[in-house]
Amino acid sequence: MIDIRKNFLEDKDFIGLRGLFMSNVFPWFLSGKNQDALKEKDFQFVHIFYEKNNINSQFFDWLNPLLNKIKPFSIVRIKANLLTRTSKIVDAGMHTDFTLPNNKVTTGIYYLDDSNGYTNFEKGEKIKSESNKYVSFDSKLKHCGSTCTDKDFRMVINLNYIDS
């Protein structure tokens, strides 16, 4: 089941979080499959907040409004993704996020802007990128993100966690 919630955070929390990501102090890191990825636009910029049981970012506390609303039992990984505009929309490729033995992992996607980009699911559902929207689903569900053509970039926060 895919759960979609619009206007997820209070405006002040959404504006603060989005403002941080757009500031000149927030570090984005280039991530691509290989050296040729840059030529083929098969790359994105990422910021890893939490991974391998460790906080990996000095900006982790900025996620508190989001985490307080989600209330995860345990965090697996949290990262922000920034995809730059392309001349045509490019899907990132179907994938699953995490599976852990004896635990059901949930994937959450928090959208930080409006664009014609989307999250596409293997079974055909397509979720449009809309500011302050939160989508959650079982991490075993195949999905992919996309680039956009109508804005300079597309930003999301990708969360993987155990509910309870």
Image (cartoon, rainbow, N blue to C red):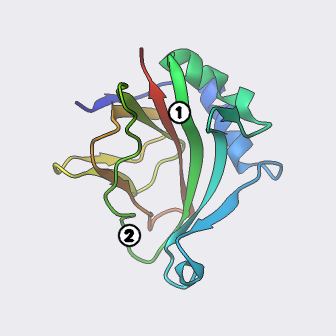
Q: Which residue is mark 1?
A: 76
Q: Residue at x 49, y 73 (%)?
A: 42
Quadrant of the drawing holding the N terminus: top left
Q: Secondary structure at mark 2?
A: loop
Give the percent coordinates (x, y) of residue 129.
41, 47
Find residue 47 and report its horizontal and vertical position in percent: 66, 49
Q: Please, which residue is most extreme toward the front here?
A: 101
Secondary structure beneath dot 1 equals strand
125 vs 23, nearest the viewer: 125
The answer to which of marks 1 and 2 sits earlier in the sequence is 1
Q: Which mark is residue 66?
A: none
Q: Residue furthest right?
A: 25
How would you rate the neighbour count of disc 1 (Cα within 10 Å): few for under 14, some for 14-19, many for 20 or more?
many
Mark 1 or 2, which is nearer the eye?
Answer: 1
**Residue 10 in sight:** no
102 lies above or below 45: above
Task: Name the foreground residue: 39 vs 149.
Answer: 39
Give the alpha-carbon distance from disc 1 to disc 2, as whole Å: 27 Å
The residue labelled by disc 2 is 90
Label 2 Cα crowd, 10 Å radius (few <14 / some 14-19 / many 20+): some
Left/right placement of residue 67 relative to residue 111 reads: right
Q: Is residue 39 visible?
A: yes
As drawn, is 131 to the left or to the right of 118? right
